[in-house]
Image: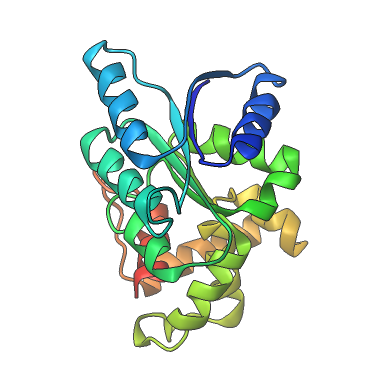
């Protein structure tokens, strides 16, 4: 896996690099601001050698507000094949929903505290690089709190909402079953009911799982 890291804290950037390289991944570039991130990805694109995933801080110089997430949104628009995983100190709903506004393929949003859980962090980077989704449970919980007020999810049972929340974290059906201590078959039934209640008919062009998560987060 080829990774670019954008983080203005040198210590954290070097720490992330060490975590990933120790597990056999290749950190091909490390930058300290959003402008440098856009530049290095542009240069790689010109050479036809884009990375598999970018790991970027939400807040970077010069204003330390939203430079990182805006760069992430731009990269997803210009290079949709590159996974983008953003790191944030706090749950920031606006940034999370902005990042997820388009396709949720190859996207992640984690709190920086999650980096301390090394296996989970590296698994999340790999999942995003492979086109999956990785959302921090706290991000999902906060967005769910808002979503519960919306009518679009009113038809879901509490268990179905719980299953959908775990889906939004990027978990497979088997992982959801293990978390809830139920059978895979029970989870598959819940997922089918979720698709039905959200009006997501089978389609060759759209992934219903992704659409269900987007409906859940953006409603």
> Up-down: is 137 above or below 11?
below
Q: Horizontal and vertical percent for residue 189?
A: 55, 63
Measured from the top left, where is residue 103 in percent x and y? 30, 49
Residue placed most toward the observer, 32 or 79:
32
Which residue ends up furthest to the top in the rendered image?
Answer: 47
* Residue drawn at 54 percent across, 37 percent down: 127
| Residue drawn at point x = 30 percent, y = 70 percent | 199
* Residue found at the very far front of the displayed protein: 62
Q: Quadrant of residue 190?
A: bottom right
Nearest the viewer among 199 and 176 is: 176
Total marks placed: 0
Depicted 213 relative to depicted 77: above or below? below
Q: The C terminus appears in which quarter of the rendering?
A: bottom left
Say whether residue 84 is left or right of residue 123: left
Whether residue 100 is visible here, answered yes or no, is no
Q: As rendered, which of 202 and 167 lies closer to the eye?
A: 167
Task: Give left or right: position of 3 versus 202.
Answer: right
Q: Horizontal and vertical percent for residue 90?
A: 57, 65
Q: Quadrant of residue 150?
A: bottom left
Taking the image as drawn, is residue 196 in sight?
A: yes
Looking at the picture, how far across and down is residue 22, in whole percent?
72, 20
Q: How is the image coloured?
A: rainbow
Closest to the observer: 158 or 217? 217
The vertical placement of 98 against 41, above or below, is below
């Amino acid at each position: 896996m080829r990774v670019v890291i954008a983080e203005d804290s040198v210590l954290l950037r070097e720490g992330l690099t060490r975590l990933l390289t120790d597990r056999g991944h290749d950190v091909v570039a490390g930058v300290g601001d959003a402008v440098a991130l856009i530049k290095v990805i542009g240069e790689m694109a010109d050479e036809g050698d884009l990375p598999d995933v970018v790991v970027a801080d939400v807040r970077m110089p010069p204003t330390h507000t939203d430079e990182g997430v805006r760069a992430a949104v731009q990269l997803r628009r210009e290079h949709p094949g590159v996974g983008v995983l953003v790191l944030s100190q706090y749950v920031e709903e606006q940034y999370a929903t902005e990042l997820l506004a388009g396709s949720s393929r190859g996207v992640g949003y984690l709190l920086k505290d999650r980096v301390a859980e090394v296996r989970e962090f590296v698994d999340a980077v790999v999942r995003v690089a492979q086109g999956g989704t990785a959302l921090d449970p706290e991000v999902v919980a906060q967005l769910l709190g808002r979503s519960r007020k919306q009518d679009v999810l009113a038809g879901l049972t509490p268990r179905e909402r719980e299953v959908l929340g775990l889906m939004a974290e990027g978990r497979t059906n088997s992982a959801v079953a293990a978390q809830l201590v139920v059978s895979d078959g029970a989870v598959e039934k819940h997922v089918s009911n979720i698709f039905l209640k959200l009006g997501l008919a089978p389609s060759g062009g759209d992934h219903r799982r992704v659409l269900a998560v987007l409906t859940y987060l953006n409603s």
